[in-house]
């Protein structure tokens, strides 16, 4: 099958099932899987123009709603966190999209940038897994009733507190806004909406439970991706000599696989211990990060 905007030939079944498998695992941690589909498009499919980032946003727009629906239905959507992620990330997405086109059009430079972003994410996840194992706290699966016990106790501009699984969690809203503003820039450049960076930070640095942040991170990624696609489309008129606008057909095909993958991933997440979810993501991320960085210097 030929995709004219991406200027590539690819097997549609390979695209569909790759998106399904990737999003099934990553959606459990609040990540759409776009951060893994990007290197797949660049290295396997040979899609290296700047529009690959916009196409990644199209995947997010189509695939994420099914996963968000499951988290809302199971009452595991932390709305104050979702709002903070959206408000903090949106401005950065616009800045990042412009930086991607203006300063990172060369695939080689883009790959090394993506490699360091992934390396940081993988390091944070690995550090969290090691510290958990040292403490001997692999954790027992939560009881089914715990997944319907998310209760927001306080929600203000300064602080949010909520109860989940018998524990009380508190975080500062300003911290989320600051983190998301920087993550938005990186996400805008990388074409991932920022969720793959925000989710690990919320778990490893802020200390929030992965079963709670997943829905909020995905919803934030969805909103920022909608804005990202619109912005990339507008930039295509400003930079007519550069392939900027998304390949809608390719993005829709990836998204169709992602719809099923995210729905199933969100549905079975409550049966998976957090340490295993982090372990799967860590292995994937570190492998790709090291591959990209080494390719730049060799």
Image (cartoon, rainbow, N blue to C red):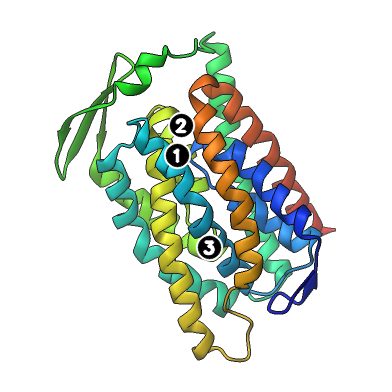
Relative to 280, residue 116 above or below: below
Residue 33: image x %, image y %?
59, 47
Q: Distance between the residues labelled 2 and 1?
A: 5 Å
Quadrant location of residue 26?
top right
Relative to 76, does residue 135 appear above or below in the rendering?
Answer: above
Q: Name which of mark 3 and mark 2 comes first in the sequence.
A: 3
Seen in the image, is 270 located left or right of residue 12? left
What is the quadrant of the N terminus in the image? bottom right
Between 8 and 232, the one nearer to me in the picture: 8
* Mark with earlier residue (3, 1): 3
Other-residue count near label 3 (Cα within 10 Å), few / some / many at <14 / 14–19 / ≥20 = many
Q: Which residue is drawn at 68% across and 78% down?
A: 5
Q: Which numbered marker is on residue 242?
A: none
Query: Which residue is labeled 2 in the image?
Result: 204
Alpha carbon of mark 3 to alpha carbon of mark 1: how far?
Answer: 21 Å
Residue 280 location (% of width, % of height): 65, 31
Q: Quadrant of the C terminus?
A: bottom right
Q: Which of marks 3 and 1 is in front?
A: 3
Residues packed near mark 2 inside 10 Å, few (<14), some (14 to 19) or many (20 plus): some
Is 21 placed above or below 8 here?
A: above
Front residue of 41 and 169: 41
Q: Is residue 250 left or right of residue 143?
A: right
Q: In this view, does 48 lie to the left or right of 67?
A: right
Q: Mark 3 points at which residue?
A: 57
Toward the right, the furthest residue is 298
Q: Is mark 3 on a helix, strand or loop?
A: helix
Residue 296 at least partly seen: no
Q: Mark 1 points at which residue?
A: 201
Q: Residue 188's x, y, as percent?
A: 49, 64
The reply to whether dot 2 and dot 1 touch (C-beta < 8 Å) is yes
For residue 181, what is the image quadrant?
bottom left
């Amino acid at each position: 099958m030929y995709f004219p905007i991406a200027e590539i030939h690819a097997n549609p079944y390979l695209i569909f099932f790759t998106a399904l498998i990737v999003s099934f695992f990553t959606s459990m941690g609040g990540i759409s899987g776009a951060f893994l589909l990007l290197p797949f498009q660049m290295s396997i499919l040979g899609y290296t123009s700047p529009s690959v980032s916009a196409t990644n946003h199209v995947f997010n727009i189509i695939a994420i709603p099914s996963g968000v629906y499951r988290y809302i239905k199971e009452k595991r959507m932390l709305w104050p966190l979702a709002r903070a992620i959206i408000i903090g990330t949106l401005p950065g997405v616009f800045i990042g999209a412009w930086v991607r086109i203006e300063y990172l059009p060369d695939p080689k430079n883009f790959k090394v940038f993506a490699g360091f972003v992934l390396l940081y994410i993988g390091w944070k996840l690995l550090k969290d897994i090691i510290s958990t194992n040292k403490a001997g706290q692999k954790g027992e699966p939560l009881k089914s009733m715990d997944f319907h016990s998310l209760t927001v106790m306080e929600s203000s501009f300064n602080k949010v507190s909520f109860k989940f699984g018998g524990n009380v969690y508190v975080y500062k809203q300003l911290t989320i806004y600051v983190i998301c503003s920087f993550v938005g820039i990186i996400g805008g450049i990388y074409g991932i909406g920022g969720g793959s960076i925000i989710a690990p930070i919320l778990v490893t640095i802020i200390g929030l439970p992965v079963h709670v942040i997943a829905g909020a991170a995905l919803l934030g990624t969805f909103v920022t991706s909608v804005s990202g696609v619109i912005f990339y489309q507008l930039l295509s008129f400003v930079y007519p000599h550069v392939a900027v606008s998304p390949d809608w057909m390719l993005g829709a095909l990836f998204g169709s696989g992602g719809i099923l993958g995210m729905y199933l991933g969100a549905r079975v997440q409550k049966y998976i211990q957090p340490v295993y979810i982090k372990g799967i993501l860590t292995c994937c991320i570190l492998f790709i990060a090291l591959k990209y960085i080494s390719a730049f210097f060799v």
